[in-house]
Amino acid sequence: MKGAIAMKQLKRLLRKKGFTISEVLVAMMIFAIMTAIVMQILAIAINQHKNNVNSEKDMDKQVQDIVEYNSNMVKRETADMAINFVRTGSNKVASIDITGADIMRNNAAEASGDGRLELNTIKANIDKDTTGDDDNKDNAGMVSEHDHIYGTKGITSVMVTETTAEKDDSTKTITLSVTVTDSKNVLMKAESNSLKVVIPDKNANPKVTINGSNMKYEPLSSTNYRFTALSKATSYSFTIKFELSNDDYASEYKSFAKYFIDHEYDGSDEATLRSATFKDSKDPGVYNQR
């Protein structure tokens, strides 16, 4: 019955040739109300999105403030600290006291601001077992700032030949030709086995060239290069070329003998000595000693 009434009303509406003013006003009012509802929903959604964005920005700002605060808390020019090395094996490293250490600088543009921890004085008690058979651990030496060729112990020999040329009135170009003799193939015994060569701190335009395809290298820093074997061989060779100003040459490098053999070298052949063959017989793993 209700369905029939609705159909009659619909047919009557379809037969109409026009609408009254009241009907038009009612339709416009309904349309306006629907438009207002839609606009309100859109406004709420847009406002919520803005609030979410502002919240994310506030969180980022808080994180940044916390990081900067903590950075300022730990930033020190000098510090006293103790570092403990705990390890297995026969070597025992006691507590190492570091006094007056320059903490890494935050601004890398500053002089020496390369993110390193610079140590002025170290007091250490190291118990080294010289009877161990482990190639990589027990029978190892301690590397100092004057050890410029070091790595896995047991490499037969490392021969270094230096060629120095005057690039211009204020700069020298230094080329180090290195031949590694590895009769026991110790470089192939483990993936971690390697030889490291350190060049002066203020070097410029460094370039490393590997002769052949049986060795690769990777820069550990701007001064330290790590060489590893790719295939078994009894001999490997490579060159390291870099530049030093005359002032840096006199202070950082001084001479082949002082840089590689002994920083206090005072032999009569210092001025002409340009080549030497090194072994680690004095201190296992440290090669630039004769």
Image: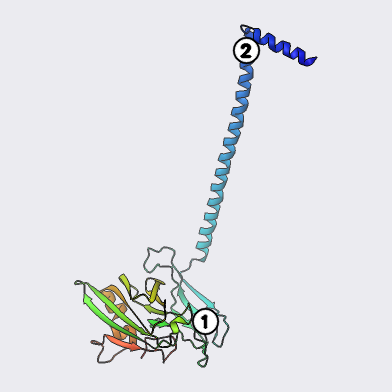
The local crowd at label 2, few if under 14, some if 14 to 19, many if 20 or more residues have their Cα within 10 Å, is few
Badge 1 marks a residue whose secondary structure is: strand
Q: Which residue is mark 2?
A: 25
Numbered label attached to residue 187: none
* Closer to the camera in the image, 241 or 141: 241
Distance Cα–Cα, label 2 vs label 1: 91 Å
* Closer to the camera in the image, 283 or 48: 283
In-image side of 270 versus 29 (left or right)? left
Is residue 262 visible in the rendered image? The answer is no
Circle nearer the viewer, 2 or 1: 2
Q: What type is the residue that disc 2 sits on? A: Leu
Image coords of residue 148 (percent x, y): 37, 81
Q: Is residue 49 above or below residue 65?
A: above
Seen at 79% across and 15% down, the residue is: 2
Badge 2 marks a residue whose secondary structure is: helix
Image coords of residue 101 (percent x, y): 46, 75
In-image side of 67 versus 178 (left or right)? right
Q: What type is the residue that disc 1 sits on? A: Ile
Is residue 135 visible in the rendered image? The answer is yes
Q: Number of labelled discs?
A: 2
Image quarter hosting the C terminus: bottom left
Residue 205, quarter of picture: bottom left
In-image side of 287 versus 269 (left or right)? right
Q: Earlier in the sequence, mark 2 or mark 1?
A: 2
Image coords of residue 70 (percent x, y): 53, 61
Residue 161, quarter of picture: bottom left
Residue placed furthest toward the left:
169
Image coords of residue 174 (percent x, y): 27, 76
Q: Which residue is mark 1?
A: 96
Residue placed furthest toward the right:
1
Image quarter hosting the N terminus: top right
The way the protein has been coloured in the rendering is: rainbow
